[in-house]
Amino acid sequence: MDAIARRRMIRRYTDRPVSREAVIALLEAATRAPSPHNRQPWRFAVLAGDARARLATAMGERLREDLSRDGVPPELIARDVSRSYQRITGAPVCILACMTLRDMDVYPDDRRNAAERWMAGQAVAAAIQNILLAATDLGLGACWMCAPLFCPDTVIETLGLPNDWQPQALITIGHPADAGKGRDRRPVDEVTIWLDN
């Protein structure tokens, strides 16, 4: 509960490197998440050095194209692209969380195949939450970025990932430069119904 209460999305990091041992500890925490049929559909790519800049540049170009098509003013596009680039390259390490359906069950109908896909996605999300909580426990900061969902083909091509890896999220990792912002949460009674009979 302590790590859950202290966890914040951290978007700015110091220059202090993150040890390989710490990254391995985060990945080990991720692989302890529950998964459907115990198929463990998560896959991870650890990005450091130039890989972060390559990905940030490619994703930024895709973001620029999308926002241009949306009619967003150029100055706002430039700001969004720059902010995204800085968040990715400003972190000493990024973990790209991907999903594979390779080992999931396959059915003759779309309804059950869609359920398998959702189940795999839920497992990857649980693995990501384990990374975030483990990072907090280790005194590291982390931020969950869903941007890869908007340009999976760009991510796969830029990083040379296996074809069955479906990018889900990018988690930036580093030593926090600030405490992050606490966010209000809706009270339990506002998001819960009790069905007793």
Image (cartoon, rainbow, N blue to C red):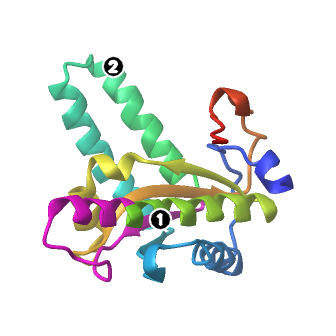
In the displayed structure, 5 sits above or below 134; it is above
The amino acid sitting under disc 1 is: Val
Asked if one can make out residue 197 in the rendered structure from this viewpoint, the answer is yes
Tell me the crowding category of disc 2: few under 14, some 14 to 19, or many 20 or more residues within 10 angstroms, Cα based.
few
Tell me the crowding category of disc 1: few under 14, some 14 to 19, or many 20 or more residues within 10 angstroms, Cα based.
many
x 37%, y 36%: residue: 81
Determine whether, in the image, residue 162 is placed left or right of residue 108.
Answer: right
Q: Quadrant of residue 183?
A: top right
Residue 124, disc: 1
Range of residues picked out in magenta? 92-118
Looking at the rendered structure, the secondary structure element under dot 1 is helix
Q: If the image is split into quadrants, where does the N terminus sit?
A: bottom right
The amino acid sitting under disc 2 is: Glu
x 44%, y 56%: residue: 169
Task: Measuring from the top left, give residue 139's x and y in whole percent.
Answer: 81, 60
Queried whether the magenta region covers residue 68, the answer comes back as no
In the displayed structure, 58 sits above or below 130; it is above
x 44%, y 80%: residue: 37
Residue located beneath label 2 in the image? 75
Q: In which quarter of the image is residue 189?
A: top right
In the displayed structure, 156 sits above or below 29; it is above
Q: Are marks 2 and 1 in contact (CB under 8 Å)?
A: no
| Mark with earlier residue (2, 1) | 2
Determine whether, in the image, residue 91 is placed left or right of residue 134.
Answer: left
In the image, 48 versus 194, the foreground residue is 194
x 54%, y 50%: residue: 144
